Image (spheres, rainbow, N blue to C red):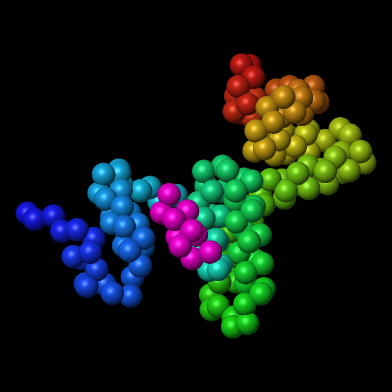
Amino acid sequence: MEIKTLNQLSFILPPVKKVGLVGLIFFIWLLNILSPLTTFERAKLVVLLRPRDPNAHLRLSELAAEALDTSLARREFDRAITLLNSSQPSIRGISSRFEEVGTFVFAERTITQEIDNLKKVVNRYPGSRDLYLRMAIQSYRLSDLQLASSYWRLARELDPNHPEVLEIGVLLGMGI
């Protein structure tokens, strides 16, 4: 195979700058030697290639949330909303996807609000085992095992032999 110089190849793509052609050749070379991209990496690449596309940012937000990277998920979700609000034509079907992804991305905020609401109810009904168990489960979902175990202990003090208390204790790894 004969290797042609850049000057010999320039007649093939006359409008392309020589620097662009070298960059393209380098990019193709990189694609051939690198390992295949994961879905997450492809989504990042799509955002780089189409930075003004709200769907690209929404997809990256969704994948980041699944990977438990909440800061990236929130940032990309906010960017997608900003892009959607700034664009004139509406994009069909995207509003339902925003709703689905938004609840998934912002689940942490929703869980925290629910715990705060449960605390208010516990102040009115301090002897409710079920409220403490619910707070333990929600704290566990936030990966706050210390808080989850303290709520579970309060529920166990109220009703130590209840099957639900024992099951949740096993879930929390309390070693009953």
Magenta part mainly helix, strand or loop? helix
Q: Is residue 132 left or right of residue 47?
A: right
Percent x, y for residue 61?
Answer: 56, 55
Extreme-left residue of the structure: 1
Q: Nearer the viewer, residue 117 or 51?
A: 51
Percent x, y for residue 146?
Answer: 72, 24
Q: Is residue 45 magenta?
A: yes
Residue for point 59% across, 80% down: 90
Stretch of the chain drawn in magenta:
41-51
Percent x, y for residue 10?
Answer: 24, 68
Q: Is residue 99 visible?
A: no
**The N terminus - image quarter:** bottom left
Q: Is residue 126 visible?
A: yes
Extreme-top residue of the structure: 175
Q: Is residue 105 left or right of residue 114?
A: left
Q: Quadrant of residue 88?
A: bottom right
Q: Is residue 73 magenta?
A: no
Q: Nearer the viewer, residue 38 or 8?
A: 8
Q: Is residue 103 above or below residue 162?
A: below
Q: Nearer the viewer, residue 46 or 107?
A: 46
Q: Is residue 92 above or below residue 149?
A: below
**The C terminus - image quarter:** top right
Q: Quadrant of residue 125?
A: top right
Numbered disc total: 0
Residue for point 62% across, 69% down: 83
Q: Is residue 19 left or right of residue 97?
A: left
Extreme-right residue of the structure: 124
Percent x, y for residue 157?
Answer: 79, 22
